Each structure stands twice: as structure tokens, then as C-alpha cells.
Image: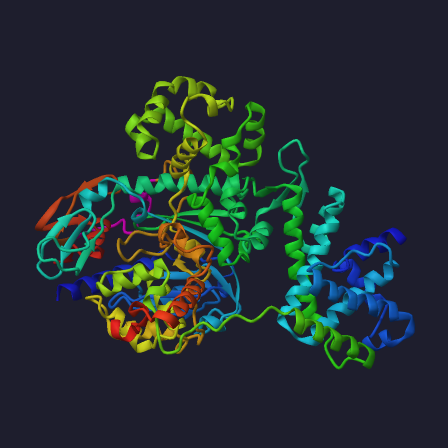
């Protein structure tokens, strides 16, 4: 009953949105070569293997069916509408990166993520446990929330990713498009002819490069440095060497004895590093740090640089980047879990406010009954927390709670 | 003119060389003529060298034309024998020949070969850096992702502004790898039909040599009707145990264990049973997915498990593979472990390895 009301509420809102804002929906380049897919609003079933020649046809389909989520392939196919992957004739794929708060440790999750045991009803905050602490059941439902802080953490990772793409891979800003996903993170699409035909192995190398997986500091020349000249030559051709140096500098500047022990240095080495901090930093960019701490040899320095790599890497979802058949959310379309739009970041990423710029529903207010919701922000206003109460909220805020399954329309 | 012909003799796989050869308008039957006897001999020698030494010599001492024309003839001979081992071996030996020649060339020539034969964007950066060449990222990834040493991993290379920096040695090694690919394609594309009599005799001699040189085929691995859980690689074992306990697994892990089990001969039914231990599993959906991976549905492709590197990327490898030796694929681990178990089994028949998966399930 309540669910039915929610569905028809969302269906008419989503339909109206697409009817009136067709211009906000972006179509991918060579759209006739892309596969499209949609999640149905009511049963959340994936309908895929569709193709559209023109934007009009696509819009007509969306307005007619009103899916909760719209997707399109990162890949280009000879026959994108073929019912089997093998029959599509893969021609290449854009390089796609997904940065999601799910993959980034942030303290706010403990505050706003919730879980509930489907067997005994036990509830708790933070990341869901494997087993219900009360009844031992494994049937645990997660309710992930998102807030300015986790979105900020995701943004920071995106900034790091963009540095990899531009200064390491030499991509220009024309080849990159940055989007807020509409939920917990950012997407970066790269349309580069030179990289389009890369297979899975090559894309895995790219993912590993960005996450720093398998990095060996000795191969970047830093563990055998002989002075400033050599360092500057290294930095001229190796972006990762630069990152290791910057990250290492920062780590040493801020690190405590405990921090150094945590990365695997002995108590003695850690104390020596702290005592000699000034000397180390002084000699750092002159390439003379290797001999600056007695008792700290190459193996110790390698540990410092591995920590630097961990800090400098960007936490992308490796599955998305390596999958050459991936469907990704259609640009400008609505996110079924929030009612926000997947929104292009056209200006500076730093000043982009996703909770404001991704709002799709600007008009009117809706009366809803909220079962339980934490405090949250939409646009410039802060709402909640709510618990089992009727409230009247601006449409965007109401839709968010309804999409999240925390409220129903009254 | 002579200089350029010499260059074609060194690099007969380039499009320039192909054009030169084409312009001669030769058919296989022309090689029966006495004036081509020396070309036929050199073609046979090329293939012999590949099989015997793993590298084709560069014969700077013969007439350039012999060195040029014997190359496409050798490709045609190799193609007519239709043997994968020979094809790979020959392409490898020709690419090794090219690598050795390139090692002594001026940077200008090396870059020309990289550009003309492979379409790479590269430049010489000189020894003012510690590297000699910079190669565009896309080309690097395409050719180097077949190498598995950590030195070739992109994350361990100097990369800047879309270029990967390489020493001379590394660059020529990559060019050779690229050339190997080209030669394999050229073998496939070369004429294949009934050979004229004299060439037929050559092909027969090569076949005889091939049967001597071919490595003994791999021992067939599966102990029929028996699945040895103890021989599973650590990653698969951990997924397997998680499933037995009814725990959730990430998608890639589910795919890995499903395709692994199917590939070692476990029945679809048994795999479905394993998955339905997860409390909220939907048997219908599980069955569909397992059948899909088994190649019974959808694209009809039977999937193999992801290789070790992929599992590493997704954080599913157990302790960086330190229990696995130099294995690159979970199925390879299993086959090797199985041989080990098999050998033990013949004498002692340890109970552990006797346990069929059907009972465990």
C-alpha cells in the first residue's frame, strides 16, 4: 500500500522530470554504437541489450517506461542491441573510473550507516557486522547513507585520480569528463582514441597504477639515489617517483613513533627517525636522505615509501575500470536511490557542491511519513533527524528519503 | 638503392618490404625455378634455425634479395604445415633476429622500425635522463601487458605526460615482442595451398625436424571423476571455505570459484548446491548464473577463472601468492598440485586427496 503510493509518486515525478528536462540528459558520443540498459522502478529488474539511434528515441523510451536508473555501455559495439555479448562485436571502450564512498574509509560511516538483522530485528550503526551480535544470523540488511563528509572524501580521491590522468597519462581536460554519480561518489569518463582499444589486461595495469598495487619503490630509483642531480632527473620522467617523495616527506613531517612502528619499522628505527626528523627533511629534496638516519637502511626506507604510496594512490573501484563491457549510469539521468541527477562537474571540482548542483526537483513540497532518518542536507538546508513522524519537505529532500526507503508519501 | 635493400633484408616484416616483395609478382610455383634455389634453401634454413636455435640468423653475407625473399617463402612454408607450435616458434625466432639487429642500430633507425612496423609513437630522450626512449602509454600497455615480471608493471615504470620511459634494451625488447605479433599475423595471412613438388619436399623435411623438436605434450591433468580439494590454490580454497560456511563472497570471487569448479569438471548441479548454502540465495538465479558461466546459456562461452594478477587487482589473492610458486593462473596451480597429489597417491593413497567434492558438498 505505502510502497504502491511511493512507486506511483516516484513514477509521475520521474516521468515529469524527463518530459520537461530532456535537454539535461546527455547522450554519449557515438550513441548508436552503445548498449543501453534500465532498471525498472517497481521490481528493479535490469532490462538491457537495447540500442537507440537518436536522443529522441531514447527520451521517448524513458518517458514511456520511467525506469528508476538508466545506463549505457562504456563500450562501442557493431551491433549494441544484439541479445548476447558475443554477438555484439566489441569495437573498443572508453576508460571509466568510479570513485565511491564505499571504497573509502571515512569516520562518518560509523555515524550514518545503519544495519538491521532480518531475523531478529536487531539494529546498529556503522558498517554491518558479518553476524548479528544478538542472534548470530547472517541475514543483515545494510542501509547506507551519505553525507557531505563522505562525498568530500570521494572528491579528494577524484582530485588525486585526475592528477594521475593528466600529469602521468598526459590526457587533456578535453578528453576527461567528471561527474557526480548522484549518490556516493564520482565518475570520470575518458574518451581517448589511443586508449579505446585496450583490453582487460592493459586496463588492469592502469587500475593497478592508480591504486599503487604492486609498486616497488626500488624500481623508481629512490633506494639507490646518489644526490640531487639524479633525483631531479628521476622526477623529470617518473610521476610516481614524485608522489613517493611528496608522500614520504609529508609522512615523515607528521609521523609519530607509533606511526612509524605501524608501517613495520622497529621501535629503535622509529625513534631514530623522529629524533633526526629535521636532518631527514633538510636532506630530502637533495636526495641525501638515505644516509640521514643511522640504523635505517634501504628496507626501512622502502617501508616509508610504501606508506607514501598508500597515501598518494587514488581509491578507484578496480572492477569498473577493468570491465570492458561495463554499463555505466547515463549522464544527466536520475539516480534511483536518491532522486539526484548524475551531474557533470564543469567548473572546478573543489568548489562543486554535489548536494546542491545535483538536485533534480526544485519545485514544491511533499508531505511524507519518515520512519527513521539521520540529519541530512539538501541544497542549503539541513533536515532531520526524524523518527516516526509526518513532515512536509521540499520535493528533493522528500524524494531522497522515499528513494532511500526511509519514508512514504502520505 | 642498395642501402635501402639492405634495410629491407634486415627488417623483411615491414610494410616497405612487403611492397617490395609484392612488386616482384612472385607465385609459389616460381620458386621451383633454378634461379630461386638459393632462396628456397635460405627459407628452409630460416625455419631450421628457428627450430634448432630459437633464433634466425641475420645473413649479411648473402645477397640482400635472398634474405628478403626467403622471408615470405618461409612464412608460406610454416603456414602450410599448420602447426601452432611451429608458428609461435618461428615468429619468436624471427623477432629475436630483429631484436639482435636493432640492438646495434642508431636510435633513428630503431624509431623508424617502431613507427613503420608497429605504428608506435616514440621518441629518443637521450642519455641525459637515465632512460633512452619514451613510448606512448597506449602502445606500451598493448605490448607489455603480456610480460609478467614486476619490472614491466606500469606502476613500476617511470611514466610522465603520456609516455613510458625505457632503456634501449627494454625498448628493443618491446619492439621485438610487437614484431612477433606481426609475424604471427603474416603467417596466418600468407598463401596456403598445395605446395609445388620441390617446396613440398622442403615441407616434409621440416615436418620431420618438427617431430623431433616438439616438446613432449603436457601430462593430462585431471584425475577423472575426482576432485581434490587439497589441490585447490589458496584463493579458491578460501572462497570454497567461505561458501561452505554460508558466507557472502564478492562478485569476482563468486565468478572465480564457479568457473574454477566447472573447469575442473564439477557438475553444474553440485556448484549450485554449494551456493545455495548462502542463507538468502535464490536457487533459480544461482542456477542461471552457474549455467551461464558453464557456457550452457547466453553467449555459450565457457568461462575460465580470472588469472592470478586479476585476482590480485581485486584484492582476492591470498598473501600475494607466496604459497603458489611461480604460477600465474589458479587452474595451473591445481594441475600442478594434482600431479603432486597423484604421485603421492600412487604409493600411499592419502585419505585427504581421495575425498570427492560431491561428498564434501
Q: Is residue B294 left or right of residue A290?
A: left
Which segment did they paint magenta? A353-366
Instruction: Report x, y in % for residue A122.
Output: 9, 54
- The answer to which image quadrant residue B28 occupies is bottom right
The relative height of residue B106 versus residue B350 in the rendered view (above or below) is above
Is residue A10 inside the magenta stretch?
A: no
Is residue A359 inside the magenta stretch?
A: yes
Instruction: Report x, y in % for residue A113.
Output: 20, 48
Q: Is residue B309 visible?
A: yes
Q: Quadrant of the C terminus of chain A?
A: bottom left
Pick whichever, A79 or A314, lies toward us: A314
- The answer to which image quadrant residue B10 occupies is bottom right
At x 46%, y 73%, the residue is: A82
Instruction: Report x, y in % for residue B20.
Output: 83, 62
Pick whichever, A304 or A58, lies toward us: A304
Q: Is residue B73 left or right of residue A54?
A: right
Pick whichever, A115 or B2, lies toward us: B2
The relative height of residue A296 versus residue B303 in the rendered view (above or below) is above
Pick whichever, A77 or B89, lies toward us: B89
At x 45%, y 64%, the residue is: B332
Q: Is residue A284 visible?
A: no
User: Outermost residue, right direction?
Assistant: B35
Instruction: Report x, y in % for residue A141.
Output: 18, 57
The relative height of residue B31 versus residue A351 in the rendered view (above or below) is below
The image shows a total of numbered marks equal to: 0
At x 91%, y 70%, the residue is: B35
At x 35%, y 68%, the residue is: B258
Amino acid at each position: 500500500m505505502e510502497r504502491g503510493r511511493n512507486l506511483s509518486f516516484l513514477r509521475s515525478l520521474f516521468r515529469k522530470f524527463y518530459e520537461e528536462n530532456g535537454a539535461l540528459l546527455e547522450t554519449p558520443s557515438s550513441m548508436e554504437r552503445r548498449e543501453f540498459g534500465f532498471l525498472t522502478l517497481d521490481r528493479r529488474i535490469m532490462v538491457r541489450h537495447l540500442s537507440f539511434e537518436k536522443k529522441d528515441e531514447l527520451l521517448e523510451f524513458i518517458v514511456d517506461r520511467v525506469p528508476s536508473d538508466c545506463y549505457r555501455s562504456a563500450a562501442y559495439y557493431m551491433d549494441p542491441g544484439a541479445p548476447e555479448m558475443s554477438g555484439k562485436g566489441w569495437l573498443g571502450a572508453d576508460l571509466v573510473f568510479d570513485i565511491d564512498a564505499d571504497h573509502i574509509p571515512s569516520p562518518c560511516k560509523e555515524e550514518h550507516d545503519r544495519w538491521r538483522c532480518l531475523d531478529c530485528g536487531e539494529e546498529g550503526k556503522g558498517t554491518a557486522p558479518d553476524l548479528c551480535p544478538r542472534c548470530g544470523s547472517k541475514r543483515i540488511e545494510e542501509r547506507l547513507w551519505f553525507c557531505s563528509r563522505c562525498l568530500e572524501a570521494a572528491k579528494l580521491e577524484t582530485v588525486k585520480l585526475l592528477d594521475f590522468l593528466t600529469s602521468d597519462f598526459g590526457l587533456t581536460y578535453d578528453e576527461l569528463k567528471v561527474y557526480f554519480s548522484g549518490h556516493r561518489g564520482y565518475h570520470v569518463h575518458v574518451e581517448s582514441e589511443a586508449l579505446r582499444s585496450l583490453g582487460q589486461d592493459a586496463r588492469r595495469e592502469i587500475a593497478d597504477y592508480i591504486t599503487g598495487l604492486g609498486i616497488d619503490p626500488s624500481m623508481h630509483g629512490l633506494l639507490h639515489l646518489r644526490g640531487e642531480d639524479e633525483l631531479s632527473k628521476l622526477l623529470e620522467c617518473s610521476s610516481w617517483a614524485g608522489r613517493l617523495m611528496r608522500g614520504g616527506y609529508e609522512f615523515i613531517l607528521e609521523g609519530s613513533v607509533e606511526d612509524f612502528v605501524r608501517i613495520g619499522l622497529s621501535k629503535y628505527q622509529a625513534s631514530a627517525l623522529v629524533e633526526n626528523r629535521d636532518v631527514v627533511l633538510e636532506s630530502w629534496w637533495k636526495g641525501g636522505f638515505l644516509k640521514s638516519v643511522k640504523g635505517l637502511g634501504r628496507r626501512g626506507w622502502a617501508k616509508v615509501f610504501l606508506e607514501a604510496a598508500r597515501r598518494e594512490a587514488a581509491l578507484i573501484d578496480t572492477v569498473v575500470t577493468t570491465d570492458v563491457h561495463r554499463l555505466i549510469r547515463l549522464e544527466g539521468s536520475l539516480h534511483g536511490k536518491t532522486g539526484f541527477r548524475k551531474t557533470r562537474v564543469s567548473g572546478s571540482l573543489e568548489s562543486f557542491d554535489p548536494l546542491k548542483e545535483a538536485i533534480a526537483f526544485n519545485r514544491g513540497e511533499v508531505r511524507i511519513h519518515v520512519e527513521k532518518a539521520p540529519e541530512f542536507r539538501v541544497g542549503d538546508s539541513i533536515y532531520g533527524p526524524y523518527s516516526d513522524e509526518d513532515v512536509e519537505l521540499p520535493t528533493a529532500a522528500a524524494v531522497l528519503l522515499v528513494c532511500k526507503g526511509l519514508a512514504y508519501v502520505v | 638503392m642498395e642501402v635501402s635493400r639492405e634495410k629491407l633484408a634486415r627488417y623483411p616484416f615491414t610494410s616497405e618490404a612487403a611492397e617490395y616483395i609484392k612488386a616482384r609478382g612472385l607465385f609459389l610455383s616460381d620458386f621451383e625455378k633454378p634461379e630461386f634455389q638459393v632462396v628456397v634453401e635460405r627459407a628452409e634454413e630460416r625455419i631450421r634455425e628457428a627450430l634448432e636455435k630459437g633464433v634466425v640468423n641475420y645473413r649479411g653475407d648473402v645477397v640482400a634479395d635472398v634474405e628478403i625473399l626467403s622471408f615470405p617463402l618461409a612464412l608460406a612454408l610454416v603456414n602450410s604445415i599448420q602447426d601452432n607450435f611451429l608458428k609461435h616458434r618461428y615468429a619468436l625466432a624471427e623477432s629475436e633476429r630483429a631484436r639482435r639487429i636493432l640492438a646495434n642500430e642508431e636510435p633513428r633507425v630503431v624509431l623508424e622500425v617502431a613507427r613503420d612496423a608497429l605504428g608506435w609513437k616514440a621518441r629518443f630522450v637521450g642519455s641525459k635522463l637515465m632512460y633512452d626512449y619514451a613510448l606512448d602509454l597506449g602502445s606500451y600497455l598493448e605490448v607489455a601487458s603480456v610480460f609478467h615480471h614486476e619490472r614491466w608493471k606500469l606502476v613500476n615504470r617511470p611514466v610522465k605526460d603520456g609516455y613510458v620511459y625505457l632503456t634501449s634494451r627494454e625498448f628493443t625488447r618491446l619492439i621485438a615482442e610487437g614484431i612477433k605479433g606481426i609475424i604471427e599475423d603474416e603467417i596466418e595471412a600468407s598463401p596456403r595451398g598445395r605446395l609445388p613438388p620441390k617446396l613440398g619436399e622442403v615441407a616434409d623435411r621440416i615436418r620431420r625436424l618438427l617431430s623431433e623438436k616438439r616438446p613432449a605434450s603436457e601430462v593430462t591433468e585431471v584425475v577423472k571423476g575426482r576432485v581434490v580439494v587439497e589441490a585447490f590454490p589458496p584463493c579458491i580454497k578460501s572462497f570454497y571455505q567461505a561458501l561452505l560456511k554460508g558466507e557472502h563472497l564478492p562478485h569476482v570471487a563468486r565468478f572465480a570459484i564457479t568457473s574454477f569448479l566447472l573447469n575442473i569438471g564439477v557438475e553444474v548441479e553440485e556448484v549450485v548446491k554449494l551456493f545455495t548454502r548462502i542463507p538468502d540465495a535464490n536457487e533459480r538465479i544461482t542456477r542461471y548464473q552457474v549455467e551461464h558461466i558453464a557456457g550452457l546459456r547466453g553467449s555459450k562461452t565457457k568461462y575460465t577463472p580470472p588469472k592470478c594478477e586479476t585476482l590480485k587487482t581485486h584484492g582476492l589473492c591470498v598473501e600475494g601468492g607466496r604459497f603458489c610458486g611461480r604460477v600465474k593462473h589458479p587452474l595451473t596451480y591445481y594441475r600442478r598440485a594434482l600431479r603432486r597429489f597423484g604421485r603421492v597417491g600412487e604409493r600411499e593413497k592419502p585419505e585427504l586427496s581421495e575425498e570427492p567434492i560431491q561428498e564434501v558438498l
